[in-house]
Amino acid sequence: MNTIIVASARPGAGKTSVVLGLTKAAGKSFGYIKPFGDRLMYKKKRLWDYDAAVAVNILGLEDNPEDITIGFEHEKLRYMYDEESTKAKLLDMAEKVGGGKDVLLVEAGQDLCYGASVRLDAISMSKSMDAGLLVVVSGNAETVIDDITTVKRYVDAQGVKLLGVVINKIKDVEDFKTVYMDSIDAIGVPVLGILPYTEAMTTRSLRHLSEALFAKVIAGEDQLDNKVQAVLVGAMSVNEALKSELLKQENTLIITSGDRSDMILASLEAKVAGIVLSNNILPPANIVSRASQLGIPLLMVQNDTFQVAKMIDDMEPLITREDTDKIDLMGGLVKDSMNMDIL
């Protein structure tokens, strides 16, 4: 069994997407664990890490949360495990989940340092499990070079086997190679692949948004898989809103107060992806009925319009189990752009 620790230099680099892309692109059997959970969720009366739950579902695995995640809280883990028992637990999980599989992918936390105090950071796990380290980096070009330089110094100091880096979300791959690859090669880190930025990977489903916002769905429940690419805050007059190009796009989400009947009706007739109704105000029955007829979801939330807009803006576009199109897309990007000899 080949064990690989998949880490990221910074939060939001796309580590989970790369993991899922690898499993989709390679004709091998995979096991998956995420020892230190950093996105707690409650599913079927059990605590799961969000990324782990998605990976288990997409990979068709039957593992229990206890078999793929040791814990979520630093304080509890410091109390329950010392260095030796942490290593023993990791090796036991690897054998239980990865036994009989070609590759075991071990997803680390949100950055290289996360979990260091409980010996569940990427470097510590790489040492404990005698596993190679794959690091995902993303951002602007200078940030990418900074991160690769830091990774090189860190792994050299720790004596860890670095398989290489995956550079993710690059808008112009050929230009990036021309301008920056000489500098990256001089650092002495293998580049396993450069994955292009793809706008489709940034979409979010209304289902994911409704769950994250704890929204009450009052219409269009069967259309919650609609994708959201742009957001328009309906705080202006309808006349001004009608001038916006965003209102003419089917993948636009409107955020407006539930008592703005004029804005809601205009948005419905524009056939937007969905509407978030702020301030916990239920619109008139005729509007709800019209939304149901058109199949446009109405999500009612307690927060005010500004708070909702801020919450959505801060949300990372995570992959969900329903995002089969994103997973297929990522699998194609990995297959076309990444050296998978490490598997």
Image (tube, helix red, strand yellow):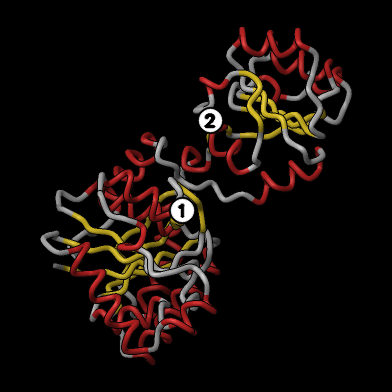
Residue 266 place in picture, x, y as percent: 76, 14
Secondary structure beneath dot 2 equals strand
Tell whether 262 sits left or right of 27.
right
Q: CA distance from mark 2 to mark 1?
A: 20 Å
Decide which of 314, 154 is in the foreground and name it.
314
Secondary structure beneath dot 1 equals helix
- Residue at image position (46%, 78%) is 77
Quadrant of the rendered image containing residue 253: top right
Q: Which residue is mark 1?
A: 50
Given the image, on which type of amino acid does mark 1 rest? Tyr
Given the image, on which type of amino acid does mark 2 rest? Lys
Looking at the image, is mark 2 or mark 1 earlier in the sequence?
Answer: 1
| Above-or-below relation of 24 to 280 | below
Decide which of 250, 28 is in the foreground and name it.
28
- Residue at image position (66%, 13%) is 291
Residue 214 place in picture, x, y as percent: 64, 40
Is mark 2 in CB contact (under 8 Å) with mark 1? no
- What quarter of the picture does the N terminus occupy? bottom left
- What quarter of the picture does the C terminus occupy? bottom left
Can residue 238 be seen here? The reply is yes
| Above-or-below relation of 145 to 277 | below
Tell whether 39 sits left or right of 338.
right
What residue occupies the far right of the structure in this picture?
237
Nearer to us of marks 2 and 1 is 1
Residue 224 place in picture, x, y as percent: 53, 27
| Above-or-below relation of 206 to 115 | above
Quadrant of the rendered image containing residue 52: bottom left
Q: Which residue is mark 2?
A: 227
